Amino acid sequence: MKQDNRKQNLKNQYRINEQIRVREVRVVGDDGSSVMPTKQALDIARQRGEDLVEISPNAQPPVCRIIDYSKFLYQQKKKAKEMKQKQVKVEVKEIRFGPQTDEHDYNFKLKHAKEFLEEGNKVRAYVFFRGRSILFKEQGEVLLLRFANDLEEYGKVEQMPRLEGKKMFLFIAPKKAGQAKKSQQKMDRERREAEAQEANKAVEQEIASDGLAANAKGLDALAKLKEEMPGEE
């Protein structure tokens, strides 16, 4: 029943043929568009055995297509289905820490968080304080702030660390595709590495140059020495 209602709503979404009562329309097709009286557009549609379908009623003049209406509805339904499939379903992935998480465990969870954000999911990281470990809540906050900083290239903080009961939460949302920016720390590190590589190349070139010069001097000295030595009888 619901499916029949959806089909009916789609059919009623567009005006066709005699339902189009404006004086003129813009007819668009594969070969371009042209403005003509609505009666002329209707005559062309009848000659082709197709329908005049109003696809943009608010334009001046309204925009229409000459096409079989059933085919047109099928195309619109197919486009809507494709758009729905392309919509990314955002999930919230949880990352749990203890107030005294070791470095290996931290890096392991950091790696997973990067993967979650790259896939377009949100990350809810939290520190769970068990029993008297609530005394280390400042330590948990520092850990979460470090986590947010390490993920700066992949996501943006939606909620700073906040204590709720025995848990301190941090929410990070993924950056939009194509808009991920490198953190300042990473850019500085890459710049230093590039400068170091250039410096190493310069040193290598200088060493090579000095070696060639030394070899040339050695050959010159050897030639001079041979000239000075008396010839054999």
Image (tube, rainbow, N blue to C red):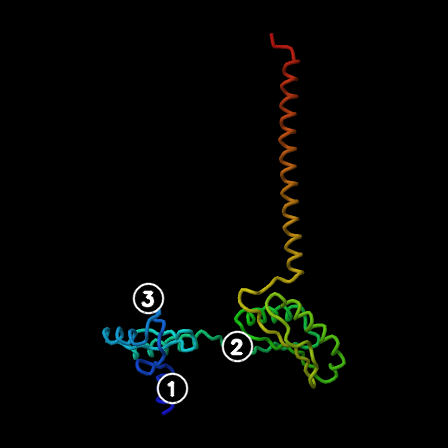
> In the image as oriented, which residue stretches furthest toward the bottom?
1
Sequence-first disc among 1 and 2 = 1
Location of residue 214 with respect to 188 vertically, above or below: above
Q: Secondary structure at mark 3?
A: loop
Mark 2 Cα within 10 Å, few/some/many (few <14, many 20+)? Answer: few
Which quarter of the rendered picture does the C terminus lie within?
top right
Badge nearest the viewer, 1 or 3: 3
At x 62%, y 31%, the residue is: 212
Task: Give the residue at mark 1.
Answer: 9
Q: Residue at x 30, y 79 (%)?
A: 69
Q: Residue furthest top?
A: 233
- Choose top left, top right, bottom left or bottom right for residue 1: bottom left
At label 3, which amino acid type do we have? Asp
Q: Nearer the viewer, mark 3 or mark 2?
A: 3
Badge 1 amino acid: Asn
Determine which quarter of the picture holds residue 153.
Answer: bottom right
The disc, 3 or 2, on the residue closer to the chain's N-terminal end is 3
Q: Nearer the viewer, residue 59 or 125?
A: 59
For label 3, the crowd category at 10 Å Cα-Cα, with few meaning under 14, some 14 to 19 and many 20 or more, is few
Residue located 64% across and 41% down the image: 202
Tell me which amino acid carries mark 2: Val
Marks 3 and 2, how far apart at CA: 37 Å
* Residue 2, x across and y down, in percent: 38, 90
SS for dot 1: helix
Secondary structure found at label 2: loop
Task: Say which residue label 2 marks.
Answer: 90
Residue visible at 69% across and 84% down? 164
Mark toward the viewer: 1 or 2: 1
* Distance Cα–Cα, label 1 vs label 2: 29 Å
Question: In this rendering, would 65 be left or right of 124?
Answer: left
Residue that carries the numbered disc 3 in the rendered image: 30
Which of 68/113 is in front? 68
